[in-house]
Amino acid sequence: MATIWLFVVLNSYIVWNALAPVVRILPAFIIIFGTILISKRLRFTKSLCSLSLLVILYFFWVTALLSFSFGSVVVRLLEFVPMLCIIFWPKVLILKTYSIIRKIIIFFAIGSAILSVLILLGFGERLPHLVLPPREALHERIGIVYYLYGFFIADCSRIAGVSSRACGMLQEPGHFAILLGFVYIIERFSNRKINFWIVICGVLTFSSTFVLMMLFTEIYQLFVWKKIKKVLLILPVIAVGLVAVYSFLPSDIKEQAEYLAYGRNLEQVVEAYNETSSLTGALDERASKESIASFEKLSTMQYLFGGGRLNILEGDMLSDYRGMILNIGIVGLVLSTLLYFWILRRTPLKVKIALGFAYFLVIIHRSWMLFSPYIFFLAFLAVFFYKEYNPLHVAKARTVNKNDIKLFVTPSIVEN
């Protein structure tokens, strides 16, 4: 149920139908009820209690400013309360939950990567699929619908056709790239071997976000001589391999790959930054003029405490930090940042760099993700696994039950 809850708050296609209320309510109620049943096994540490208070404070702030009906309040309760339960669960239960989440994400990574290649090769319209309606006013206005190939989503526009960017089960490839990036961080800091398909699919989202999250996770390797030698040996081989594969691709596939990786919107963002020499100027390329005007008209009180509004029905778009300020104010932004970095406390610099940069990427181009709890939950999982199940950290801390370590080191026991 915790796994289903996560994919509900991620706004995956399991809530794109008339049964969405049931799909939202059922896992939340079972998590709450189950947590009550195991109340004697919960971990009420000072650190987790402080974290829960920050989650509650942030929940009340976001709910007060973004909920305009009783139904929207209930939806936010169904999103945040299960997280408040899960963080207190016994360690082995959190481990088993992530084990299921990981398998599902790898399944979607494999399927989406294969689908992405098939679409690149021109099979997008020929493969059997269902057509799902647009999910947002902006998508409706520009003519984007969704093709469902079995379990895997691809977006399709009336101008460009079927997109070959890997989408997984989410609304946009960029959303899936962020999810894959967090899974990469969790895997890396729990000392597991990275699944090959996570990386391949992350690259095939054609989102620079995944690549940057991966690079900032590995940046600490530059300070360890043994690791540098390994990187210096492997990197040229990978580079030569990629160049060789790319050189044999047909010209039309090369052009499509170049457009998706750079020309789609990164080119305009880079050009805008070069012209304005400011981050805001670059971010304006991803925002509508009307939404920028709404932000600039904010009063001092609205700037501090939120309350500004975007015309979502008209497709207004302001997804960077300014959109967050417009909706929940500087106070809300500070609460969000405080909550996130509270999760990172008492972790080494390499963990703070990777997860801190992930937060920076989210807040500068998809800040609305922070109105739901899943970014905080994924950061919590990354820190949890580093502190509790990374053998090197555990050897220093000596705070984990030996059986728990065995469960992590030998995941087959968990699976059995």
Image (spheres, helix red, strand yellow):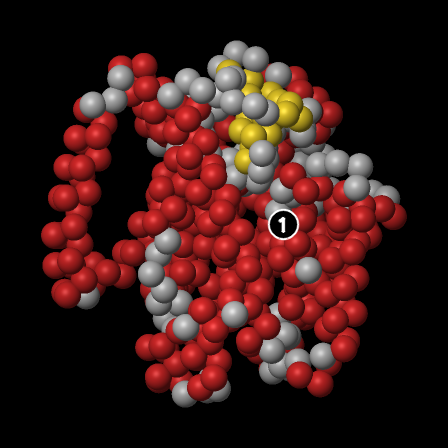
Q: Which quarter of the figure is the N terminus placed in?
A: bottom right
Among all residues in the image, which is located at the extreme right? Answer: 70
Along the line of sight, the residue nearer the viewer: 224 or 255: 255
What amino acid does circle 1 point to? Phe
Q: Position of residue 378 (x, y in %)?
A: 53, 58
Among all residues in the image, which is located at the extreme front? Answer: 416
Q: Is residue 296 visible?
A: no
Asked where in the image residue 12 lies, by quadrant, the reply is top right
Q: Is disc 1 placed on a helix, strand or loop?
A: helix
Q: Is residue 172 visible?
A: yes
Disc 1 designates what residue?
7
Q: Position of residue 83 (x, y in %)?
A: 66, 63
Q: Is residue 384 above or below residue 330?
A: below
Q: Is residue 179 above or below residue 166?
A: below
Q: Is residue 67 above or below residue 112?
A: below
Which residue is painted at 40% across and 42% down in the image? 202
Q: Position of residue 102 (x, y in %)?
A: 50, 56
Would residue 187 be found to the left or right of residue 78 on screen? left
Along the line of sight, the residue nearer the viewer: 38 or 338: 38
